Amino acid sequence: MKISDKYTFLCDNDLSNVKKVIETKKFSGTSEVIGEYENKLASFFDSKYAIALSSGTAAIQTALFAAGVGNGDEVIISSTCPSMSIFPIIFIGARPVFCDTSVDSFGLKIEEIEKNINVKTRAIMEIPMWGYPTDVIKLNAFTKSKNIPLILDLAQAHGTKFNGKYLSSYGDISCFSTHDRKIIATGEGGFVLTNNEEYHKKAIGFIQFGNMNGVDFGLNYKLGALQAGLGISRIDFIKKQLEVRQKNANYIVSNIKSKFVEELKIVNGGDPNYYSLILKLNFGNNVEKIKSLEDSGIPSDVIRYNYKVLYEYPAFRRFKRVCPNSEKLVKNITTIPVHPALVKQELEYIIENINNLS
């Protein structure tokens, strides 16, 4: 059996919403539908401001600009993040400073952040991988005490909560992707959320050629109206997706019998969105077991993306700073698909193969 990790969401309102946009004959990023989409995003996530963007990478670059990060500055970031999170930092001439995580979490370790803060530190970026929450309350309090902006890269964390609130509630500015595989999918796209009026104004100008006033700097990172039309129809289905993903994840976890396999620890007060289920493995050779599942048709992002701490890739070795907790974490986990398209037979097959690991 081959389990697919690709889930493409479709809903009945897609065609009618896109048709409405076409009928307006306004397809650019300044169409009224963009404002409608942004208002709906802000309302769903209980945010003061939402800004629709052309990609998740554009969202990070916009957040960096709004936070005042520029050439020669430093941004503290976890070494467990993907390359998409760090490329925008490098692109603007800032330096990513790798920081260790907690032992069983993708959350930055406060004590390690403290060691890396200096006069060049302009922002701290947290990346909850595969939608697993981090202790953003503790991190938020720390960054505020240091007067350093907290950027949350929530590209995989749509709907993830901590203490009953969406993670974006705790960031100074939060970044999202709406790529095809995401829980809100518009093909390509992204958005940022913030409650900070100054950040909102700077971000709006930045994505519209610096307000085209010949004074401010900016690029064109606006989202197209047709994609916004898709987004509008799909926001209504986020909670249903989360329910199914959680149900599938819980079913798999509750039926795991192997003493060498367990779900990655969820921080107290956290609610994952289960973009993927993360399992912690305790075998002598975890890679061998992950490949065994892969050979059985159960895909893993660890294999698909050759997942490891970022400084082990050639493009980022010059920024290397050894992070022992992060190195151990990435070597002991694998991902399991739990998206809504999976049927009972497929879930049973996943469970059977996990329990056969020895």
Image: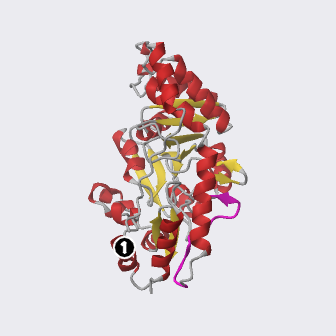
Residue at image location 52% in from the left, 45% down from the top: 123
Front position in the image: 59 or 247: 247
Can you say whether 84 is above or below 354 in the image?
above
Front position in the image: 146 or 124: 124
Can you say whether 139 is above or below 303 in the image?
above
Left or right, 199 with reference to 94: right
Residue picked out by circle 1: 296
Can you say whether 92 is above or below 141 in the image?
above
Magenta stretch, residue numbers:
259-272
Residue at image location 57% in from the left, 47% down from the top: 158
- Give x and y (percent) for residue 228: 49, 28
Question: What main secondary structure does the magenta stretch of the protein show?
Answer: loop
- Give x and y (percent) for residue 51: 54, 30
Q: Secondary structure at mark 1?
A: loop
Residue at image location 65% in from the left, 39% down from the top: 45
Residue flagged by tag 1: what amino acid is it? Ser
- Give x and y (percent) for residue 61: 43, 37
Colouring: secondary structure
